[in-house]
Image (spheres, rainbow, N blue to C red):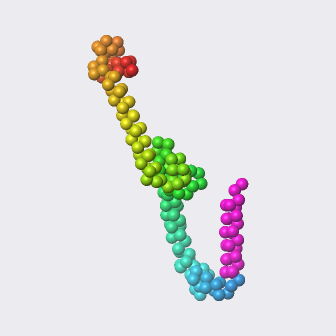
Amino acid sequence: MKWRPVIMVGLICAAAAVVALWVIHSRQVGSWLGVHTGTVNESGPYYGFWSGFGSDLEEFGILGAIGAGIYQLIKKYNCHEPGCWRIGQHAAAGGQFLLCYRHHPDYQGRKPTHELIERLHREHLEREAAIHGKLDEIRQHLPANPPAAHRANVPGTTATTAQAAGICQEL
């Protein structure tokens, strides 16, 4: 069981209880609170509350909805490491995850230095060049026009599908 959240909730509840007792037993604070929430010095019980402070409850709900929306937007961009609240700015695993610099495997918990950025960029360019080299090799091995025998073996196909079938058979 994680004790940190339990202790935090306990401290918050204790603080709320202390504030509530102080407000109830203090005449000056209780009077101030009653006047400013509209529960005293009005024509009827709680008329001042519902026409004053109580009418703001809807506004609190709207602010809560806006806060929840902002939280969800921020959560979308959070680091994918469980329990991390930082913004994930660095792609990992081919872009499947967004991680902060502390959890990204290339950065090893430190902010990226200029040398690290240059090395990663150079490795990326080498990988791209290798991929393009392989594609050029494959493109050179493909014949421009497949033999007519491949088109004749497949009844009811067009020239394009026969050409594709011939390329696949040769590879």
- Residue 13 in magenta stretch: yes
Q: Is residue 78 visible?
A: no
Q: Position of residue 120 (x, y in %)?
A: 44, 46
Work out whether residue 148 or residue 92 is closer to the camera in this orientation and state it: 92
Q: Position of residue 63 (x, y in %)?
A: 51, 67
Q: Relative to the observer, which residue lies in front, 16 or 149?
A: 149
Residue 169 point in image, percent of width and height: 38, 18
Residue 129, quarter of the rendered image: top left
Please identify the dominant SS of the magenta region.
helix
Q: Position of residue 143 (x, y in %)?
A: 30, 20
Image position of 1 with respect to 130: above or below: below
Residue at 55%, 77% in the rendered image? 53
Residue at 33% across / 14% down in the picture? 150
48 and 135: which is toward the camera: 135
Residue at 32% across / 25% down in the picture?
140
On screen, 57 above or below 171? below
The region drawn magenta spans 1-24
The N terminus appears in which quarter of the rendering? bottom right
Quadrant of image for the C terminus:
top left
99 in magenta: no
